[in-house]
Amino acid sequence: MRKQNLIIIPEETIINKIYLIRGQKVMIDYDLAGLYRVETKQLKRAVKRNMERFPHDFMFELTIEELQNLRSQTGTSS
């Protein structure tokens, strides 16, 4: 049996990556991929391949306005 390395992520790190969008607490795909230490495109592919395992509202795309607002909140320039 292969032993996996267990990485403990501080609660504060996770909490700081949760945003309130459309009245829901959400995490951005980029941040979630970072927590799992995979590329964003790998995370998205895995989710799309296994959509039956997730609730219908598990993911959604941000509008341009939501994206701009999120960027202003986080100070992200790109």
Image (cartoon, rainbow, N blue to C red):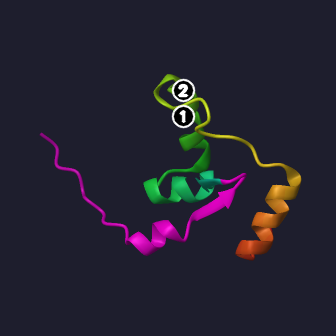
Q: Amino acid at mark 1?
A: Val
Q: Residue furthest front?
A: 23
Q: Amino acid at mark 2?
A: Met
Give the dominant element type of the magenta stretch: helix, strand or loop.
loop
Residue 2 lies in magenta, yes or no? Answer: yes
**Residue underneath mark 1:** 47
Q: In what element is the residue under mark 2? A: helix
Q: Nearer the viewer, residue 55 or 29?
A: 55
Q: Residue at x 58, y 34 (%)?
A: 45
Mark 1, residues whose alpha carbon is within 10 Å: few (<14), some, or many (≥20)? some
Q: Residue at x 46, y 27 (%)?
A: 53
* Direction from residue 69 to residue 4 in the image, left or right: left
Magenta-colored span: 1-23
Q: Which mark is residue 51?
A: 2
* Direction from residue 19 to residue 15 in the image, left or right: left
Quarter residue 67 falls in: bottom right
Which image quarter holds the N terminus?
top left
Q: Nearer the viewer, residue 76 or 53?
A: 53
Quarter residue 20 falls in: bottom right
Residue 30 lies in magenta, yes or no? Answer: no
